[in-house]
Amino acid sequence: MTDRFARRSHHDVREKRALIGLSLVPGVGTGKVRQLIARLGSARKVLEASKEDLARVPGIGPQTAAAIATCDAGAAVDEQIHRAVRTGSTMVTCEDPRFPYLLREIYDPPAFLWIQGQVQASEKSTPSLSIVGTRRPTEYGKRIAREFARELAATGFTIVSGLAYGIDACAHQGALDAGGRTIAVLGSGLDRIYPAQHAHLARDILERGAMVSEFSMGAKPEAGNFPRRNRIISGLSLGTLIVEAFDEGGALITARLALEQNREVFSVPGPVTSAASAGPNRLIQNGYAKLVQDVDDILEELDVDLPLNDGTNTAFDPAPLTLEEEALCRAMDTEARHIDRICLESGLDPSTALAHLLNLEFKGMVRQLAGMQFFLSRPIQRRPG
């Protein structure tokens, strides 16, 4: 049994490393990653494939095939893992049962997410609603976004938004004001908070929710990232509420994506003289969004059973540990210990211990310091019996 767990753990680590490496190849986005894995079976097999085999995959041209075939991203993958460990981020693949269920249902889910904080996989325990809008809201828009977020969070909804200026920040803050949960979806790496002025808001969000991103650690907040980010905002949620948006803005992209994902779209109407209300007013006029005047309009449409928010926080539930991982965790503490001491107390040789410690880093259970020092970052989930 020990050998079986060890083989599975080694396989998981190698596959995750391959998936990270594949995502770092220029020109290989989420869609191509899915196509390649669907054709060749796994990320490891993709990186081991010849240029000719890769070029036979629909949508993969000769240049991309050559880039994948010559990929040597070992050092870059190591850097991604170290950045993740330093920021307390966990990688969750689309096949992982911890991956958000609603997001897996969309037509183009990310191959994996970097997650920092607390996320529930099921929408049944904590249903989510997205609130988005312009970065240049009026005082009316700010007040409405905050009030809706606060009232929805108080009923048990998790509020999802994009950490941007304006409506996004008001939505996050409203959820926090109610002692509720909120998730920020970034258009950059989790170690690059954007905008930087929202670093304090990001810290508050992590106390009661999570930040997620499909972008590599260190990724800059480039303009092209945000439309991709928006499909995750809407994909995480049962519905999306547009508070204020100009005629052409990112919030309307999120509304369109929500409709394509067969999710509900709601709009708060605004004065016809206000350019900031032109977007939601138009959505209502064209029948793309339901006009909402209060939270009850949303609750009636979604018709979900909601446990009242009691101010408690449910921690991100890590995957069950293998026998070797349990032995390592028992040999560790929240204070750093050297690998030699950990091996002595766990009974594992250094090579085996390091392989399993890497997997524990992926699970967010262990962090590594310089000089081969490791420490527990959270309590372990022990096997029953």
Image (tube, rainbow, N blue to C red):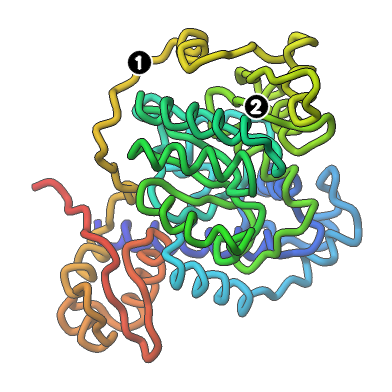
Which residue has dot 1 on it? 305
Residue ranking furthest to the right: 62
Q: Nearer the viewer, residue 374 or 229?
A: 229
For label 1, the crowd category at 10 Å Cα-Cα, with few meaning under 14, some 14 to 19 and many 20 or more, is few
Rendered position, 82 above or below 369: above
Residue ranking furthest to the bottom: 371
Determine the secondary structure under disc 1. loop
In the image, which disc is placed on residue 181?
A: none
Please state if 235 lies on the left or on the right of 5 as rendered: right
Determine the secondary structure under disc 2. strand
Please state if 60 lies on the left or on the right of 363 as rendered: right
| Residue 377 placement: quadrant | bottom left
The quadrant of the image that shows the N terminus is bottom left
Q: Position of residue 155 (x, y in %)?
A: 35, 24
Please state if 239 lies on the left or on the right of 25 as rendered: left
User: Looking at numbered disc 2 in the image, what kind of residue is underneath it?
Assistant: Ile
Q: Nearer the viewer, residue 229 or 79?
A: 229
Q: Residues under labels 2 and 1: Cα distance?
A: 23 Å
Q: Residue at x 67, y 17 (%)?
A: 269
Which residue has dot 2 on it? 242
Please state if 377 lies on the left or on the right of 221 as rendered: left
